[in-house]
Amino acid sequence: MIEPRHFVAGLNHIAHSLSRNLFPRTLRVKTPNSYEQN
């Protein structure tokens, strides 16, 4: 079995990478500083 925190971390990583691939410029324009740091 996969530990819940590992599963959640995997989902967060996938969601984060997808959001960067789908909306890289849009998110950077809206939140240039906070998005780049996070």
Image: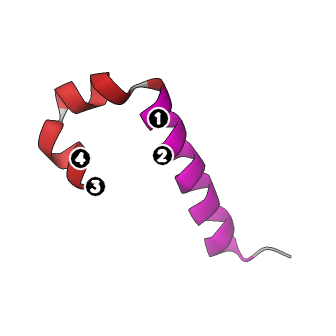
Q: In the image, which disc is placed on residue 16?
A: 2
Tell me the quarter of the picture where residue 38 sits: bottom left
Which is closer to the viewer, label 4 or label 2?
4
Using a 10 Å C-alpha cutoff, classify the residue at mark 4 as few (fewer than 14 neighbours), some (14 to 19) or many (20 or more).
Answer: few
Helix, strand or loop under label 4: helix
From this view, report whether residue 30 is shown above or below residue 37. Answer: above
SS assignment at label 2: helix
Mark 1: which secondary structure? helix
Residue contact at pointers 2 and 3, CB within 8 angstroms: no
Kind of residue at disc 4: Glu
- Label 1, on which residue? 19
Quarter occupied by the N terminus = bottom right
Contact (Cβ within 8 Å) of mark 2 with mark 1? yes
Q: Position of residue 20 (x, y in %)?
A: 43, 36
Sequence-wise, the earlier of marks 1 and 3 is: 1
Which residue is tagged 4? 36
Q: Which residues are the magenta region?
A: 3-21
Front residue of 24 and 12 = 24
The first of marks 4 and 2 along the sequence is: 2
Front residue of 4/18: it is 18
Up the image or down, 38 lies above or below 7; here it is above
In this view, the residue farthest toward the right is: 1
| Horizontal side of residue 34 vs 13, given as left or right | left
Pinpoint residue 27: horizontal percent, then vertical percent: 29, 30
Q: Which mark is residue 38?
A: 3
Dominant SS type (magenta): helix
Question: Could you tell me if the residues under marks 3 and 4 are in contact, i.e. CB atoms within 8 Å?
Answer: yes
